[in-house]
Image: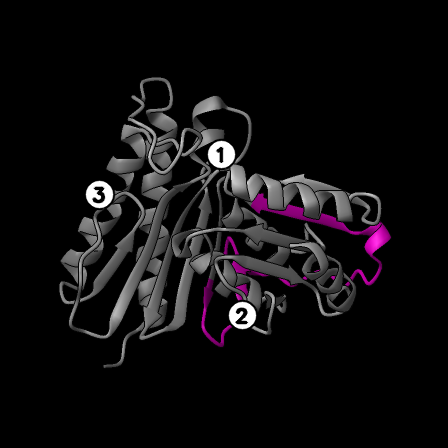
Amino acid sequence: MERDLLAARELAAGLAVRAGRLQLERRDTLKMGAPKAHVNDVVSDVDIDSERLIVDALLQQWPDDAVQAEEGHGRPGTSGWSWIVDPLDGTRNYVSRTGPWSVCIALYQGDQPRMAVVHDPAADETFSAVDGRGALLNGEPIAASSEPELEKALVGVSFQPNPRTKDRAGRVIRQLLPLAGDIRRIPAALNLVYLAAGRLDGGLALDTNLWDIAAGALIAREAGVVLGGHGPEFTTELTIGSGPALWPTLSEQVREVA
């Protein structure tokens, strides 16, 4: 079944902006729920309402599609198309006002990503991509960094804050920090789209979920970012990304300890 991917991107971008506006408007009145997988895995009523806004609108337009969504609004489908939704990637940053967060929507045909949107509400930036058509930031083309030297590179690091993953992240940071220009810790989706925009020269994410990286990964690849993991394909366990010039050095250093 064919689909107008440009129209799908326009709808997804509009929904991401609407969800981001809701998040900004309700930041002072949000209510926290019980932690999910571990004590640092937090959720608010704004996460849940943002997801409902997005999923309801998508299914109104394409009622036969499947949905994978972080806060429980997923469902099977029959069309062969699946929406991957993270309504608020970086909830702890959002609720604590200590950093950026984003709204993430990706569309898969089977197991292939075809369209993606990542919206940063605070910065009013919308990153997007359609398979084979390049990556955009607020409608303008973006491209990966050409920096070849790790000692000059700015590297983003993303990881789940559970004990096992924090131990892995500690090993990676100890390996990279003396070698890289500097390191930034940011949520996974923004890590990937900052790679796409050339703001970061390299990045890695440990123990994510598909909804954390699905949208950002397509945008990064469409911008010329090389992505991989322990093998040639990135995984939720390990995602490494950089421009082609930095890839051999960065991937070798991360794989050695991750």
53 vs 94, nearest the viewer? 94
Which quadrant of the figure has residue 79? bottom left
Q: Is residue 137 left or right of residue 202?
A: left
Q: Is residue 128 left or right of residue 153?
A: left
Q: Where residue 233 sits: x, y (%)? A: 55, 71
Q: Amino acid at mark 1?
A: Ala
61 vs 239, nearest the viewer? 239
Residue 122 numbered mark, or none = 1
Which quadrant of the figure has residue 84? bottom left
Q: Where residue 239 sits: x, y (%)? A: 57, 59
The answer for how far apart the CA atoms under marks 2 and 3 are is 29 Å
Q: Is residue 190 left or right of residue 22?
A: right
Q: Nearer the viewer, mark 1 or mark 3?
A: 3
**Label 1 environment density (alpha carbons within 10 Å; few <14, some 14–19, many ≥20):** some
Q: In the image, is residue 225 above or below residue 21? A: below
Q: Where residue 229 sits: x, y (%)? A: 59, 65
Q: Nearer the viewer, mark 2 or mark 3?
A: 3
Q: In the image, is residue 191 above or below residue 226? A: above
Residue 52 numbered mark, or none = 3
Q: Amino acid at mark 3?
A: Arg
Which quadrant of the figure has residue 177? top right
- Of mark 2 and mark 3, the one earlier in the sequence is 3
The answer for how far apart the CA atoms under marks 1 and 2 are is 24 Å
Q: Kindly state the secondary structure of the residue where label 3 is placed.
A: helix
Q: In the image, is residue 233 above or below residue 202? A: below
The magenta span reads 129-158
